[in-house]
Image (spheres, rainbow, N blue to C red):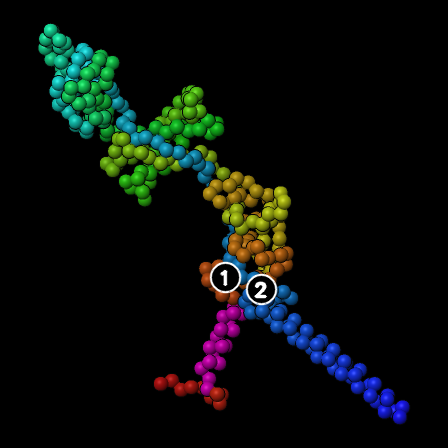
Amino acid sequence: MNENVKSKSKKPVIVVAVVVALLVVCVIVAKIQSGAQASPSGKRGGGGTVVSVKTQILEETTLHGYISTNGEIESQNSVNVFPDVSGKVMETHVMLGSPVRRGDIIAYVDPSAPGQYYKKSPVYAPISGSIISTPLKNGTTVSTSTAIAIIGDIANLQVSANIPERYVSVLKTGLKADITVEAYPNVVFKATVTRVSPVVDTTSRTKEVILHFDEKDSRINAGMFGKVKLFTENYAGEVVMPSDSLVQNGDDYFAYVVNSDSTVSKRKVKLGNTVDGIVQILDGVAAGEKVVTQGQTSLGNGSKIQDITNGVRSAEERSEKSEKSERGNRPANGERKSEQ
């Protein structure tokens, strides 16, 4: 009787042990599967996940600091034309763009008043050039201080631009600039600063600079609106890399340097000047070293990487692909398929 009781009491213990063993096996299998899925490339290396990244080799590069502003294209020499008497404009012999010579009559003004009749007074061109502003219409009342037209030399053009006060310290003659206009958005016209105003405008808080085009070009017309990219300073002697390739931690910045064994080292770097998203690295890395430019957010110190810059595959991946292709060309019995 006692033996039967003991036998029955052992059965629940055995069942529990079997259930526990099955649960342990399930947990182990689940961990193995989740570890295999965690690898982006489907393989593991160096005891961790292999991360696909893009890289670049560091080189010393000169960054060109610049100021972006707008400018007006105008003739280098222009003169306002005023009448000798007050009255009404009776005749206009020119229009916008008309060429004139010094001494040509461009308009007549009638100084007559009610009850008084006078001879029409001619208005002469004081210089040779072209009419660069629309002349006043006939019937317009003018005085001796009213400009009837403006004559300018459209063969020699310049750009006037206003630079904010905060950039005054870097302004000087000889600075180079790129000028673009809406009519030719993909064409860059080169210009040079020839004059810098000695004063700052108290209203706009800007200083005017005058730029002359390095070469004459018939596509540029007086009166056009130009976009000015004025180059101010050159930052040379340091390696550069994209600023968004760095990892920030508080006030510190880090770059990931690629090692010969396809792992990365996290280096603290010191930053210099930044131009258009490219930053100088003053300390922490050197020319010739390879750094990660994309994929750095998934990395840590010592992480294993796969460099996919320019779509280049690793030798291991190419070998695996070749082996799979070769297996796919074999029939089920292990014999190679014959070429048709």
* Residue 136 coordinates in the image, percent (x, y): 19, 22
Against 340, residue 113 (above or below) is above
The residue beneath circle 2 is: 50
Q: Bounds of the magenta span?
A: 315-331
User: Which of these two is toward me, 167 or 10?
Assistant: 10
User: Which of these two is toward me, 51 or 319?
Assistant: 51
The residue beneath circle 1 is: 308
* Disc 2 + disc 1, Cβ < 8 Å: no
Q: Marks 2 and 1, Cα distance to the nearest angstrom?
A: 12 Å
Q: Please, what secondary structure does the residue beneath circle 2 have?
A: strand
Q: Quadrant of the C terminus?
A: bottom left
Against 254, residue 193 (above or below) is above
- Total marks shown come to 2
| Residue 307 showing in the rendered view | yes
Q: Amino acid at mark 2?
A: Val
| Residue 214 showing in the rendered view | no
Q: Amino acid at mark 1?
A: Ile
User: Which of these two is toward me, 92 or 332?
Assistant: 92
The crowd level at tag 1 (other Cα within 10 Å; few <14, some 14-19, many 20+) is some
Q: Quadrant of the N terminus?
A: bottom right
Q: Earlier in the sequence, mark 2 or mark 1?
A: 2
Left or right of 68? Residue 130 is: left
